[in-house]
Image (cartoon, rainbow, N blue to C red):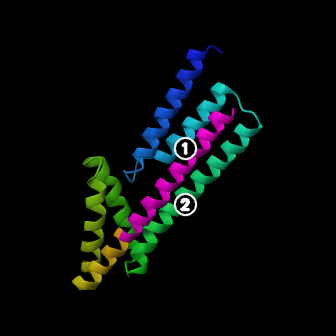
């Protein structure tokens, strides 16, 4: 394969990795999926050796685990502070709709407002509603940290694959 093609494939995969990584700043953006697709595309373009297969399996497992942890942290934070499951589901929906209507940060506003209003409506106690909101925000922070850390590890694994290959 000509050197210019190797460099082009690497550059395209690297750009996709960075788009995926920085896309993780937006809660509904599928950054881990984009990073996984970039690694898979790189593997198909450059060929899978044993190392590539092992790293692709690790990247796949990490992306799946991080996605599951992401969802668990978001709901668990609010639930721990007293939010009902109904409120959590509606807050997630509000977050998705908010992001689609007012991208990229509408979800950051809509989900917390939904938690605060719904919990206040259910409990008629602003202090309890505020606690649920704090739980959601804490869960979102932990969720972001887990997603971003997974994204950094995925990129490091991919770089190792590139430079060892």
Q: Give me the residue at 32% from left, 75% from top.
A: 134
Depicted 78 relative to depicted 9: above or below: below
User: Could you say where residue 140 lies in the image, as x and y percent from the top left?
Assistant: 39, 64
User: Could you say where residue 33 lies in the image, as x and y percent from the top left?
Assistant: 52, 44
N-term mark: 1 or 2: 2
Q: Give me the residue at 30% from left, 56% from top.
A: 107
> Disc 2 designates what residue?
68
User: Could you say where residue 61 lies in the image, as x and y percent from the top left?
Assistant: 64, 52
State which region is magenta: 138-165
* Residue 87 in sight from this viewpoint: no
- Secondary structure that dominates the magenta span: helix
As drawn, the residue found furthest toward the top would be 2
Depicted 156 relative to depicted 127: above or below: above
As drawn, the residue found furthest toward the right would be 50
User: Could you say where residue 130 lies in the image, as x and y percent from the top left?
Assistant: 27, 78
Mark 2 secondary-structure assignment = helix
Q: Which mark is residue 80?
A: none
Depicted 51 relative to depicted 27: above or below: above
Return the residue nearer the eye: 140 or 21: 21
Return the residue nearer the eye: 42 or 51: 51
Q: Give me the residue at 26% from left, 48% from top.
A: 101
Q: Give me the residue at 72% from left, 32% from top.
A: 48
* Marks 1 and 2, how far apart at CA: 19 Å
Q: Which mark is residue 155?
A: 1
């Amino acid at each position: 394969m000509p050197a210019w093609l190797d460099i082009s494939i690497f550059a395209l995969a690297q750009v996709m990795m960075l788009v995926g990584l920085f896309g993780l700043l937006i809660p509904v953006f599928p950054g881990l999926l984009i990073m996984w697709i970039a690694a898979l595309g790189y593997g198909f373009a450059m060929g899978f050796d044993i190392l590539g297969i092992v790293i692709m399996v690790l990247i796949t497992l990490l992306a799946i685990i991080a996605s599951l942890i992401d969802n668990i942290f978001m709901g668990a934070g609010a639930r721990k502070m007293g939010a009902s499951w109904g409120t959590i589901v509606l807050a997630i929906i509000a977050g998705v709709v908010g992001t689609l209507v007012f991208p990229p940060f509408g979800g950051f506003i809509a989900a917390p407002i939904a938690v605060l209003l719904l919990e206040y409506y259910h409990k008629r106690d602003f202090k309890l509603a505020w606690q649920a909101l704090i739980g959601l925000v804490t869960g979102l922070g932990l969720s972001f940290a887990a997603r971003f850390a997974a994204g950094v590890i995925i990129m490091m694994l991919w770089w190792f694959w590139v430079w060892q290959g």
